[in-house]
Amino acid sequence: MDFETQVSRVALAFGIGLLIGLERGWSTREVPAGTRTAGVRTFAIVGLMGGVVGALARGPSGALTLEGAVFLGAAFVAFAAVVALFGREENRAANKFSATTTIAALLTFVLGAYAVLGDERVAAASAVAAAAVLIFREGLHAWVAKITQIEFESGLLLLAMTFIVLPIVPPGSVGPLGGVNLREIWIIAIVLASMSFAGYTAVKLFGERRGILIAAAAGGLVSSTAVAFANAKRAAAGEGSPRVLAAGTALATAVSFVRVSAITAVLNPLLAVLVVPALLVSAAVAVGYAVISVYVPAARTAGETETQFRNPFGFWSVLGMAITMSVLILAGRLINAKFGAIGAVTGAAVMGLFDVDAMTVSMARLAAPDTLVAGYALLTGVASNTLSKVAISVFIGRRSFAIQIAALAVACLLAGWLTLIVTLRI
């Protein structure tokens, strides 16, 4: 390792110690001098010491040698013994029980050594993360105190679905006629669960009205159908106003119309000229519906009260919905692949029930031989996706919620159909 690189890495080790030391010094700024185990200066020196020890542990070739590893380990053990002793004495003097400063000092030494021996980007990022965790102590404690058991369990389940189960689910298809892609089913289940959890969290943070609308707008970028499913489940459980939940579904639907317009414009500008006007007008209608439902006093139901969500998501209902969606998406793809342009409209209608993005991409690629057929197929798929929300609300949601979603679908489809007629005549 050349001199400049060596100096820069040791300087980074010093900076790591200084950063964590600034946080420790700020957190204990009201403690009298001489009563703390370590402050800004001590942590800066600890980081520098870790960097120097790491530099000494390198061999002539610049790599960590066996002798260097032994020296590094011995230095760490000696340092750990000293800092642990002082930490214990500090706790006794202050009549408290805390290992935070001791652990932070040990981490500072390790990161200082790693800044010289390993990837300096990882060392710097780790130092920033450690300082953030330390500085947000009060907020983290308050947040943990507010978490309920069902929230914690649901969060762990969602993390397990994403980071434990998903990597081991086989990516290929199983069964005849192309089979069913198990990985796709599981990803859909994760999306459904994530949208439900996001809605739950948003309502808890921002209240029912703003929380549902924020979650719906964000969810519409991923899957408006997942938002419709989550809101229908909430409505069926009596969690929240059906009117506000329907407004959230309307907003997610508007976002999905805009998303399809953007995908079409990128993949096939000629097809976009035909379908985008209808999609954007429908999106405007959906946004207007959401605004009227939430903010016009006459649209509110008398006696409505805000209700907190009780459960982030139900695993088995999410999995069942994911399986249903996957089967229908697969059926649409098979029809589209087998019959081509002849079955484009039918295939788009089936595929669009739940997967409007894949349907849009398929129709944009089909547009080369017949733009008009592809345009009809694409709009049919979008209409099918809109009507699927009505079906979800009827079978899962409450009657009042289903009526509002049906009204939304009729308004959007009528506006889109009239706009398409005008576009064809121009």
Image: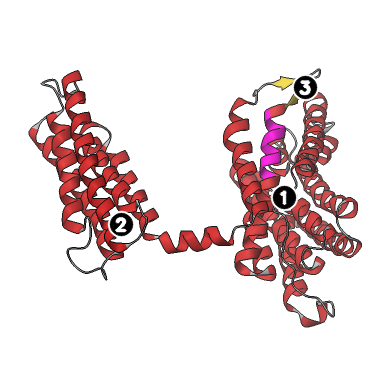
Say whether marks 3 and 1 touch (CB < 8 Å): no
Tell me the CA gap for discs 3 and 1.
28 Å
Residue placed most toward the observer, 378 or 88: 88
The numbered mark, 2 or 1, whose residue comes first in the sequence reads: 2
From what the image shows, is residue 263 above or below residue 56? below
Residue 73 location, quadrant: top left
Residue placed most toward the observer, 165 or 256: 165
Q: Which residue is mark 1?
A: 313
Q: Which residue is mark 2?
A: 91
Q: Residues within 10 Å of mark 2 (few under 14, many from 20)?
A: some
Give the residue drawn at x 36%, y 54%: 98
Say whether marks 3 and 2 touch (CB < 8 Å): no
Residue 187 among those drawn in magenta: yes
Q: Give the residues drawn in magenta, as a range.
A: 183-191
User: Residue 232: x and y, percent?
Assistant: 81, 56
SS under mark 1: loop
The numbered disc on residue 179 is: 3
User: Residue 172: x and y, percent?
Assistant: 67, 21
Query: Would residue 387 be visible to someone looking at this image?
Result: yes
User: Residue 107: x and y, percent?
Assistant: 29, 43
Query: Would residue 420 be visible to someone looking at this image?
Result: no
Q: Is residue 12 left or right of residue 327?
A: left
Give the residue drawn at x 12%, y 30%: 56
Q: Name, please, the residue furthest toward the left.
A: 3
Q: Is residue 104 left or right of residue 59?
A: right
Disc 1 marks a residue whose amino acid type is: Phe
The numbered mark, 3 or 1, whose residue comes first in the sequence reads: 3
From what the image shows, is residue 55 above or below residue 93? above
SS under mark 3: loop
